[in-house]
Amino acid sequence: MQFLSFVFLSSTMSSDAVLLLETVNFAAEKHRYQRRKDPDRTPYINHPVGVARILSHEGGVTDIEVLQAALLHDTVEDTDTTPAELEAKFGPTVARIVQEVTDDKNLPKQERKRLQVEHAPHCSHQAKLVKLADKLYNLRDLNRCTPVGWTPERVQEYFVWACEVVKGLKGTNSALEEKLEELFRQRGAQL
Ligand SMILES: [Mn+2]
């Protein structure tokens, strides 16, 4: 079930296009002051938009709640957005998917990374899709340019760790998994 804001309910039934615009606008406002770590300091919102587009354009995903969750996937982890806020605005399914892909920032970084590997196989199909697209986007970005302050060794370690996470997501979307597999192969990692 889709949750519509009262504004839409009072006037008309919302279309998927309207819902997606509402979602991308919410994400853009939440991430408005954030930048990516590349030397160009690309606006952060390019990332969630790109993750959603990987799902639709390359993964063939049309599940609107998955596409919405992709647009929102870093809002709880990286902005002041709360799960309750997402649930009120976008409904329980979207909020749950975002929650599934959100790291606990109270934990040390290495522990968060370990938990991603451990939790990946137990995520819902919808959350696995978002995770696959998020990893594919980030790995392509690392191949495009090195983040400020990162050594080549750190980049290689990220690939090896991402490969361990993606192993737990296998059997979810063959198109995305094949593209990830090729990126890992280029780095000498085996999916
Ligand atoms: Mn992300």
Image (cartoon, rainbow, N blue to C red):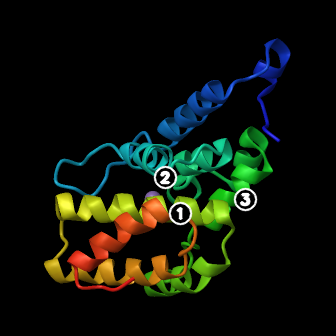
Q: Which residue is mark 2?
A: 59
Residue that badge 1 annotates:
173
The quadrant of the rendered image in which ligand 1 is seen is: bottom left
Residue at mark 1 to residue at mark 3: CA–CA distance = 20 Å
Q: In this picture, is 156 found above or below 57?
A: below
Q: Decide which of tag 1 and tag 3 comes sooner along the chain.
A: 3
| Label 2 or label 1, whichever comes before in sequence order | 2
Q: Residue at x 22, y 79 (%)?
A: 187
Q: Residue at position x 17%, y 65% from top?
A: 146
Please give the label number shown on residue 96: 3
Work out how far the residue at label 2 is from the one at label 1, CA to CA, in angstroms. 7 Å
At label 2, counting other C-alpha atoms closer than 10 Å, the crowd grade (few under 14, some 14-19, many 20 or more) is some
Q: Is residue 147 visible?
A: no
Near-viewer residue (74 or 125): 125
Disc ID at residue 27: none
Q: Residue 180 in the image: state x and y as whole percent.
A: 37, 68
Quadrant containing the C terminus is: bottom left
* Three-letter residue code for mark 3: Arg
Give the amino acid type for the residue marked by disc 1 in the picture: Asn
Amino acid under label 2? Gly
Q: Residue furthest top?
A: 11
Q: At which x and y percent is residue 177?
A: 44, 68
Q: Front-most of 112 and 130?
A: 130
Tell me the residue at 35%/64% (across/down): 179
Q: Is residue 130 above or below residue 48?
A: below
Q: CA distance from mark 2 to mark 3?
A: 21 Å
Q: Are marks 2 and 1 in contact (CB under 8 Å)?
A: yes
